[in-house]
């Protein structure tokens, strides 16, 4: 293989510099591991801690963020470790394949034979404006902290300009300090909607309505998870108060069932939903707006670990998650995971998991005395106490994540608001009518078959936008998302591998 | 009352610049992506689809959906939500696969 960068071996390679990856990187570096942190963004923080571009001179970026202090501390520690050479931060690097060292091709298909005590892993990344610059790094252990993207369920008119992802609106606001419109309806399901509505309103947009398809009453069914997480409850209440102050109406069991406009959205139809997310006939009303921010929860980015054979499980909302043990180890030796990839649960959980993963990796690589042995009794006790505290926090935040996924699980009735000509696949312009024909008349029973029959999911986004809808129309949960390459890669580069 | 995102974070941006979109000048601030500057100028679409010729712009805002493809300085299929705007950049609407009229 060309290039020599991978002759420098790292102890730990981390994919993703969001909350989980950041927490892991600084913890591992504190414990003495030589760490390489690869991330697609120019600055660390991931989607959650997305910062305004430096040139914008934001003196109070925390106005758009929750838990900013935790991030500021992590960022400071990261800078120190970059300075002393313990961490190499490869910004704007997209890891497209990971493979075990020494296996043929050393890329996607080479999953099974490796572990932390083998020669380690090669992480192949592309960078540069057109993804033409290649770089490969070698690491003894790999942590996937790959984060998540937004689950979308289509509705008539959702391809109109002005209809944007809720997370997308948030990302554009946090990084570019821009709004999608003056009057923005926020719709879909999940706690992110409240955060997005609060940010948009604080930044000057009018938010006439937040339409949440689920009912918040569902949270009371998880009394113990709720009681164990007073912080989460307080967070919800604080969003509620802020929205109230900005006169933002939050309507539960409601959905935007259509967007209207010629070249840009000018209004939406909002309907009440029954328990199964079926629109209640006669409950429709029009709300005028010039933008819609929509999203139905988050789906983890799992291409790399799934291609390596890591086992997954299904969350209560139908979304996939990597199976990990108490040490954040995946089912493949030598590979760890933390954050949204182990089940969408938010930044706080990601921080805890990242730290736990780094401690586990250090112990396994021989850098940290395992908590059961060692000579320094005082230090050992301290370590054990820290581990136990982190364990407990993870358990309680994980409980809350499961509750959240149960409350916001998309109801089967959502597809009632589709019309035959509603585009489901935005890339290939495949309609709900075509997808239904493939399912009902041609017997397609899963997303992959629908894709082969209709081209839905075959475009640039590789089914990330339509995959959930197509799978659900075929009667399945969200697809796990195994793809041989995690992003488009120039053919010339593949030929070199 | 007239709040805006820049005031919210007390931004003191470095001097702005402009680029062109289909020949018209668009103001931008340093560090903003092409998509952010276009949103800021009130433009929400800058691509037409291959089959239906329908208008599209930024959707996911984080480089996943590829709906915001644009022709940047003659290069088609550039994600506007990731590409930083730069002074004098020539941005044009991407029609279809973006290769029409490139003479290649």
Image (cartoon, rainbow, N blue to C red):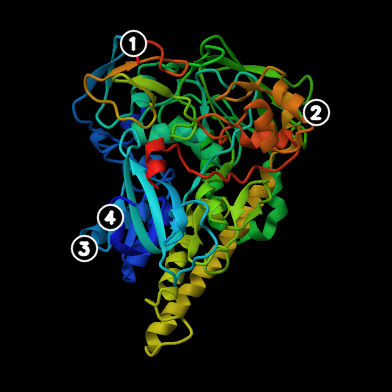
Whichever of callouts 3 and 4 sits on the residue coming sooner in the sequence is 4
Residue A176 occupies which quadrant of the picture?
Answer: top left
Q: Position of residue A22 (x, y in %)?
A: 38, 56
> Which residue is the site of mark 2?
A440
Measure how far apart labels 1 and 2 are at the Cα level.
Answer: 44 Å
Whichever of callouts 3 and 2 sits on the residue coming sooner in the sequence is 3
> Which residue is the site of mark 3?
A84
> Which residue is the site of mark 1?
B22
Q: Residues within 10 Å of mark 3 (few under 14, many from 20)?
A: few
Callout 1: residue from which chain?
B
Measure how far apart labels 3 and 2 are at the Cα level.
Answer: 61 Å
Residue B3 visible in this rendered orientation of the protein: no
Same subunit under labels 2 and 4?
Answer: yes
Q: Residue at x 63, y 31 (%)?
A: A153
Q: Residues within 10 Å of mark 1 (few under 14, many from 20)?
A: few
Measure how far apart labels 2 and 4 are at the Cα level.
Answer: 52 Å
Q: Mark 2 against mark 4, which lies toward the viewer?
A: 4
Q: Mark 4 against mark 1, which lies toward the viewer?
A: 4
Callout 4: residue from which chain?
A
Could you tell whether A330 is left or right of B20 in the image? right
> Do residues under tags 3 and 4 come within 8 Å of each other at their CB atoms?
no
Q: Position of residue A436 (x, y in %)?
A: 75, 26
């Amino acid at each position: 293989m060309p290039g020599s960068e991978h002759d420098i071996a790292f102890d730990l390679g981390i994919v993703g510099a969001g909350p989980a990856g950041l927490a892991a990187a600084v913890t591992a570096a504190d414990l003495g591991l030589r760490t390489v942190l690869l991330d697609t963004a120019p600055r660390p923080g991931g989607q959650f801690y997305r910062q305004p571009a430096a040139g914008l001179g934001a003196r109070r970026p925390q106005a758009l963020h929750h838990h900013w202090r935790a991030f500021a501390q992590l960022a400071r520690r990261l800078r120190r470790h970059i300075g002393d050479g313990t961490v190499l931060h490869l910004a704007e690097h997209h890891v497209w394949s990971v493979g075990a060292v020494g296996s043929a091709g050393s890329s996607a298909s080479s999953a099974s034979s490796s572990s932390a005590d083998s020669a380690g892993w090669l992480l192949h990344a592309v960078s540069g404006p057109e993804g033409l610059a290649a770089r490969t790094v070698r690491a003894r252990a790999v942590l996937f902290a790959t984060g998540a993207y937004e689950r979308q369920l289509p509705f008539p008119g959702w391809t109109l300009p002005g209809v944007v992802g809720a997370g997308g609106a948030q990302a554009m606001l946090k990084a570019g300090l821009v709004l999608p419109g003056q009057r923005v309806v926020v719709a879909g399901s999940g706690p992110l909607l409240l955060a997005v509505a609060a940010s948009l309103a604080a930044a000057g947009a009018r938010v006439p309505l937040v339409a949440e398809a689920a009912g918040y009453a569902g949270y009371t069914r998880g009394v113990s998870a709720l009681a164990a997480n007073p912080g989460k409850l307080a967070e919800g209440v604080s969003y509620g108060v802020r929205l109230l102050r900005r006169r933002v109406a939050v309507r539960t069991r409601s959905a935007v069932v259509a967007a209207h406009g010629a070249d840009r959205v000018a209004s939406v139809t909002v309907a009440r939903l029954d328990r199964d997310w079926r629109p209640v006939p006669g409950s429709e009303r029009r709300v005028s707006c010039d933008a819609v921010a929509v999203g139905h929860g988050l789906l983890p980015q799992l291409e790399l670990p799934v291609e390596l054979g890591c086992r997954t499980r299904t969350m209560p909302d139908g979304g996939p998650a990597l199976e990990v043990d108490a040490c954040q180890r995946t089912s493949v030796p030598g590979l760890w995971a933390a954050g949204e990839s182990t089940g969408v649960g938010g930044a706080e959980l990601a921080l805890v998991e990242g730290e736990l993963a780094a401690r586990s990796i250090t112990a396994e690589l021989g850098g940290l005395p395992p908590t059961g042995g060692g000579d320094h009794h005082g230090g050992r006790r301290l370590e054990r106490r820290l581990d136990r505290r982190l364990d407990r926090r993870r358990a309680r935040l994980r409980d809350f994540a499961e509750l959240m996924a149960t409350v916001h699980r998309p109801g089967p009735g959502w597809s009632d608001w589709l019309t035959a000509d509603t585009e489901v696949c935005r890339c290939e312009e495949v309609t709900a009518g075509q997808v239904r024909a493939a399912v009902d008349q041609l017997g397609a029973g899963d997303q992959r078959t629908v894709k082969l029959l209709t081209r839905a999911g075959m475009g640039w986004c590789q089914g990330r936008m339509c995959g959930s809808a197509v799978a659900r129309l075929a009667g399945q949960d969200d697809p796990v998302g195994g793809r041989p390459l995690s992003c488009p890669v120039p053919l010339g580069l593949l030929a070199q591998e | 009352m007239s709040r805006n995102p820049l005031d919210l974070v007390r931004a003191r941006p470095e001097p702005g610049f402009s680029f062109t979109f289909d020949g018209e000048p668009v103001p931008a601030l340093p560090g903003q992506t092409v998509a952010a500057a276009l949103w800021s100028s009130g433009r929400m679409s800058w691509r037409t689809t291959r089959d239906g010729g329908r208008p599209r712009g930024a959707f996911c805002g984080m480089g996943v959906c590829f709906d915001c493809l644009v022709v940047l300085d003659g290069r088609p299929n550039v994600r506007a939500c990731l590409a930083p705007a730069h002074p004098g950049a020539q941005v044009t609407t991407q029609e279809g696969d973006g290769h029409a009229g490139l003479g290649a």
